[in-house]
Amino acid sequence: MKKTALFPGSFDPFTNGHHDIVMRGLNIFDEVIISVGHNTSKKNRYFDIDFMVEKIKNTYKKNPSVKVIVYDELTSSLAKKHEARYLLRGLRNTTDFEYENTISQMNRYLNESLETVFLITTPEYAAISSTIIREVHKYGGNVNKFLPYKV
Ligand code: ADP
């Protein structure tokens, strides 16, 4: 049976840290579906969702094992719909852990066949966060070296 993992997130923006998780995820799973969450509503995002999806799609255009979708529903239901039995998430530190721990337990409760698989960040990407990148970009700093595409 094909092993499909969803990699859900806001990806506002999608960073080299996320890219690293996707590439390492592909060593474990047959397919990784990057699922860009729309739940926080378009106007609350910093980078436009369609712009971001386009950038991510372009990053993986030569990799048929990576799909990119937008979603606005429970991750656990989305996983069922795509026959994905795994959720892929990254862990940088204890703050990530506390957050991930609760959502992972809730997702398991909502869909008991769903396993969350955590990959510990590669040290060189540990300091990369979408929040910091938004701040730097907002004040005119060049963020391209933290992203697998150009903005
Ligand atoms: P969310 O809004 O759901 O937290 P994010 O887009 O911020 O989504 O992150 C998606 C996933 O990627 C999360 O599991 C997060 O911990 C992980 N992640 C973010 N940045 C990094 C990084 N630099 N290295 C490894 N994992 C990361």
Image (cartoon, rainbow, N blue to C red):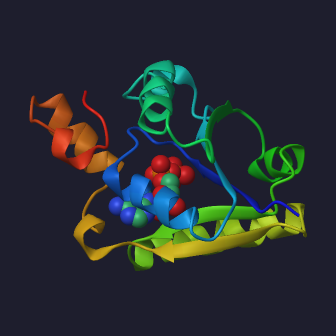
Q: Which residue lies at the image location 42% right of the left edge and 37% below the top edge?
A: 59
Q: Position of residue 74 (x, y in %)?
A: 78, 45
Residue 113 location, quadrant: bottom right
Q: Position of residue 66 (x, y in %)?
A: 60, 45
Q: Position of residue 99 (x, y in %)?
A: 55, 68
Residue 135 location, quadrant: top left
Pick the front one: 38 or 22: 22
Q: Is residue 75 left or right of residue 18?
A: right
On screen, 131 above or below 112? above
Pick the front one: 105 or 122: 122
Q: Is residue 123 left or right of residue 109?
A: left
Q: Is residue 104 left or right of residue 82?
A: left
Residue 4 location, quadrant: bottom right
Q: Which residue lies at the image location 46% right of the left edge and 27% below the top edge?
A: 44
Pick the front one: 28 or 74: 28
Q: Which quadrant is the C terminus positioned in?
A: top left
Q: Position of residue 3 (x, y in %)?
A: 77, 63
